[in-house]
Image (cartoon, grey):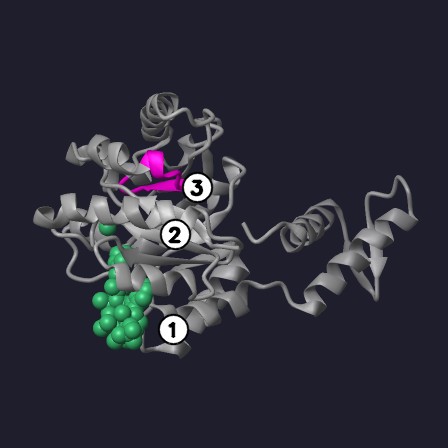
Amino acid sequence: MRSLLFVPADSPKKLDKGMTSGADAVIVDLEDSIALDGKSQARLSAAAFLKEAAGVTSRPYLVVRVNSLQTGLTDTDLDAVVLAKPDAIMLPKAEGGAAVIHADAKLAVREARGDLPEGHVKIIALATETAAALFLAGTYRGASTRLSALTWGAEDLSADLGAETNRDAEGHFLDPYRLARALCLAGAAAAEVPALDTVYVDFRDSDGLRRECEEARRDGFTAKMAIHPAQVPIINEVFTPTREALAHARAIIDAFAASPGAGVVGIGGVMFDQPHLERAKRLLARAKAKVR
Ligand code: COA
Ligand code: MG
């Protein structure tokens, strides 16, 4: 999975557009893009869309961002959408593995009631949206087999920290958010799930988006979330492993295969050891995996 496009759940028109946007996943949003008064209508719209979309062949992965456990709205959200069989929910303002275990139990109850196999609905945790969450980013490992990715957010975190802004004049994230980003990466790697980069809100600035995608890929993120369809092709391009990167990975694997038992090999005057081999295998696995 390379791109995940947020779509407000109350807009059937945008939901349809999301399906044909080229995004690997559509995130139907019941949280921040929906005002409190509009939540019930948005739940109905989300469920109707999911029922229809789930049957479409070669469709994007379908995710619903529910309201956080702190709001008391999560149960009503899940009651509305689980039976429409989303592939995953996104859990905002997650505070560590305990929040995932909590959401897991809520999903299991609905799956049992709806005659869905237990564990059908996966969980993507938004792991850095509160100050407390930062201190719990290392607790996702082993929380639930439903946990399929971690991602991070800077908007709610800046509100929780009482900050005036989260980026500097050049558009680069300031220190507290760079910490959140790094904790997401480390927390995801520790939990052995992919790390997904946060949204780039300035949706007309394609150069800025591309730069942020490249920095994310460099640092170990395997995908990025989008808020506008125009962002999807850029994200897909940057996160699709290049022919050169794949050829390089294959060369490393072949070199080790040609020297059974070797811990280290040289290729073209450069040393490669176990971490390089591991990285090469992961890149090939990602390229081979189905889009989702
Ligand atoms: N998903 C699907 N379609 C979208 C879309 C999205 N996220 N964002 C825009 N579009 C559609 C628009 O409906 C419009 O369609 P049309 O040409 O058929 O009228 C087209 O893409 C161009 O949109 P544009 O005019 O450039 O933007 P806008 O002013 O209509 O919308 C936003 C701007 C920010 C309101 C919109 O991009 C959006 O809703 N983004 C998602 C917000 C969200 O989910 N936030 C929560 C996560 S942070
Ligand atoms: Mg938010």
Task: Quickly name the residue at label 2.
Answer: 181
Q: To which quarter of the image does residue 23 belong?
A: bottom left
Q: Is mark 1 within 8 Å of ligand 1?
A: yes
The tag earlier along the polypeptide, 3 or 1, is 3
Is residue 228 positioned above or below 93 on the image?
A: below
Amino acid type shown at disc 2: Arg
Q: To which quarter of the image does residue 209 belong?
A: bottom left
**Percent position of residue 118, x then y:** 45, 24
Circle 3 sits in a helix, a strand or a loop, which is it? loop
- Residue 83 within the magenta-colored segment of the rendering: yes
Circle 2 sits in a helix, a strand or a loop, which is it? helix
**Percent position of residue 238, x then y:** 53, 68
Task: Quickly name the residue at label 1.
Answer: 230
Closer to the eye: label 3 or 1 = 3
Amino acid type shown at disc 3: Asp
Q: Foreground: 1 or 143?
A: 1
Residue 32 visible at all: yes
Which residue shows up at 23% across the image and 34% down it?
74
Q: Foreground: 2 or 18?
A: 18
Residue 227 visible at all: no
Q: Foreground: 69 or 117?
A: 117
Does residue 236 appear to the left or right of 229 in the view shown? right
The tag earlier along the polypeptide, 2 or 3, is 3
The segment highlighted magenta reads 82-93
Local crowd size for mark 1, using a 10 Å CA cut-off: few (<14), some (14–19), many (≥20): some
Instruction: Give the mark count.
Output: 3
Which residue shows up at 20% across the image and 49% down it?
42
Closer to the eye: label 2 or 1 = 1
**Percent position of residue 179, x then y:** 36, 50
Closer to the eye: label 2 or 3 = 3
Task: Quickly name the residue at label 3.
Answer: 87
- Residue 51 within the magenta-colored segment of the rendering: no
